[in-house]
Image (spheres, rainbow, N blue to C red):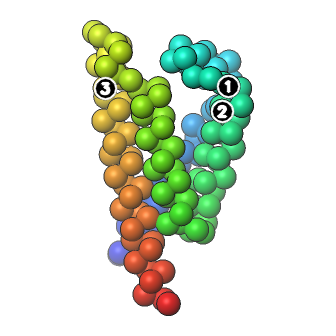
Amino acid sequence: MNTLLLTAGRVLLALYFLIPGIMKFASWDMHIQLMEKHDMPFTPILLGLAGVFQIGAALLLIANRFTWLVALLLAGLVLVINVSLHDFWNYSGIEGAHEMQNFVKNLGIFAGLLVLSGHALAERDKQV
C-alpha cells in the first residue's frame, strides 16, 4: 500500500508539471502575454526553457529517476513562478484574490515536492 500511495503521489505531482509544460507550447501566445503582463524579461527564452524543463522533469518523476534532485529543482521553479507570476500583493479585488489562491496552492505543491525529495533521499540513503 505504501508503494502504491507514493507512486500515485509522485505521478500526480508529475502531471501537475507535464500538462502545463505541454500547454506552454500549445498556447504560446497566451503564456507570453501573461509573462509580459508581469514584466518578466526574455519571455520567449524563459517560456521555452520552462516548458522543456517541466516536461523533462515530469517524465523523470514518472520514471522515478533522479527523484530527489528533480523534485528540488521543481520546488525552486515553483518559488520563482510564485513570486513572479502570482504576485497577489500587486493586485486588488477578484484578480488579487485569484493570485493569492494560486500562490497558496503553489505553496502546497512546493511542500509536496519537498516531502517527495526528502523521501527519495531517505530511500537512497538506506540503499547505500
Q: Residue furthest top?
A: 93
For residue 100, the mark is 3
| Residue 35 against residue 57 in the figure, above or below | above
The earlier-in-sequence mark between 3 and 1 is 1
How far from the left and from the top, in percent, is residue 72? Answer: 48, 57
Residue mark closest to the camera, 3 vs 2: 2
How far from the left and from the top, in percent, is residue 102? Answer: 37, 30
Point 33% across, 45% down: residue: 108
The earlier-in-sequence mark between 3 and 2 is 2
Of the residues shown, which amino acid type is indicated by label 2? Leu
How far from the left and from the top, in percent, is residue 85? Answer: 47, 26
| Residue nearest the observer in this picture, 63 or 56 | 56
| Residue 117 against residue 126 in the figure, above or below | above
Whether residues under marks 3 and 2 lie with C-beta atoms below 8 angstroms apart, the answer is no
| Residue 14 against residue 30 in the figure, above or below | below
Residue named by callout 1: 42
Residue 62: name its quadrant.
bottom right
Measured Cα–Cα span from mark 3 to mark 2: 23 Å
| Residue nearest the observer in this picture, 79 or 100 | 79
User: Could you tell whether 60 is left or right of 104 in the image?
Assistant: right
Assign a secondary structure to mark 3: helix
Assign a secondary structure to mark 2: helix
Of the residues shown, which amino acid type is indicated by label 3? Met
For residue 46, the mark is 2
